Amino acid sequence: IMTEFTGGDVYQAEFDPKAFLEYFKFGEDTWRDDFLIFILKQYCKTFTSEPGDVKGNTLIDIGSGPNIHQLLSACESFKEIVASDYTYRNHRELEKWLKNEPGAFDWTPVVKYVCELEGNRQKEAEKEAKLRKTIKRVLKCDVHKSNPMDPIILPLADCLISSLCLEAASKDQNTYRLALKNISSLLKPGGHLVLSGDLGCSFFMVGPKRFSCLVLGEEFLREALSETGFRIQEFEVLFRDDNVIDDSSDFSGMYFILARKEEVV
């Protein structure tokens, strides 16, 4: 079934952060756990293991959604994190967690797992406090603008992280290429891009609402990154088990990419 493209106005009106966060309930032993484990291990390796090249002062997260799992290891390697999203409801949901308000999503099982991955150097409460302290701002972001943070002009970042964002925001490959170029403008030459998301996915459900997704393959991703001036350093894929019956999305796998923005000679 073709899913009609769901643009920004649909997200603003209908994307329910609480329903989306159901995907991140950890420890229920579903395929979602497998994918979360895959991605958290990659983040841990990228941000906290040797050789430790991916570090610096500032990291910008493009399209954070209501999530913080993608930043739990990153806060060990960057002094400041800027989170961002297109929708105000996601901002609000994120702020709830940052301010430790009642009703905020409980990330504790995920935080605990990340602490274990990192060798239990700190307790969950310390990790959460560190991340809350490191996230300095939550900004409005639109990847279709040449400056996605417009009207705010940010100093160039040492690292960009983005998960499940560009493919959801792009209606075709050209739009995706352009969005990639737009976010790349926020990154220093020599800086790193940590990109992850779904392969072969045309839709995903958030509660009862169906959202469109641009079907991505490895070849297209490699090509688009290379055209935009990135050199891929890691490209990892976890394929979905065919026996899993689940109607919430038709993705075939998940990708994780670490790439470096070439210095212009």
Image: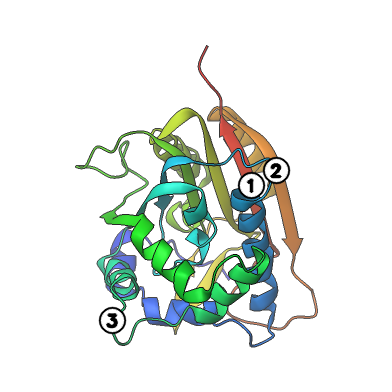
Image position of 199 with respect to 211: above or below: above
At which x and y percent is residue 168?
47, 59
Give neighbour class at mark 1: few <14, some 14-19, many 20+ (Cα, 10 Å): many
Residues at discs 2 and 1 in contact (Cβ within 8 Å): yes
Quote the CA–CA distance across marks 3 and 1.
34 Å
Q: Which mark is residue 257?
A: 1
Q: Which mark is residue 101?
A: 3
Q: Residue at x 68, y 37 (%)?
A: 233
- Do we see residue 1 in this rendering? yes
Q: Which mark is residue 2?
A: none
Quote the CA–CA distance across marks 2 and 1.
5 Å
Please state which of residues 189 and 13 is positioned toward the viewer in this rendering: 189
At which x and y percent is residue 225?
58, 36
Q: Which mark is residue 234?
A: 2
Residues at discs 3 and 1 in contact (Cβ within 8 Å): no
Image position of 93 with respect to 239: above or below: below
Question: Closer to the N terminus: mark 3 or mark 2?
Answer: 3
- Does residue 259 appear left or right of residue 131 in this picture? right
Q: Nearer the viewer, mark 3 or mark 2?
A: 3
Going by the numbered disc 2, the residue's amino acid type is Glu
Give neighbour class at mark 3: few <14, some 14-19, many 20+ (Cα, 10 Å): few
Please state which of residues 102 and 223 is positioned toward the viewer in this rendering: 102
Question: Closer to the N terminus: mark 2 or mark 1?
Answer: 2
Going by the numbered disc 3, the residue's amino acid type is Glu
At which x and y percent is residue 69?
51, 67
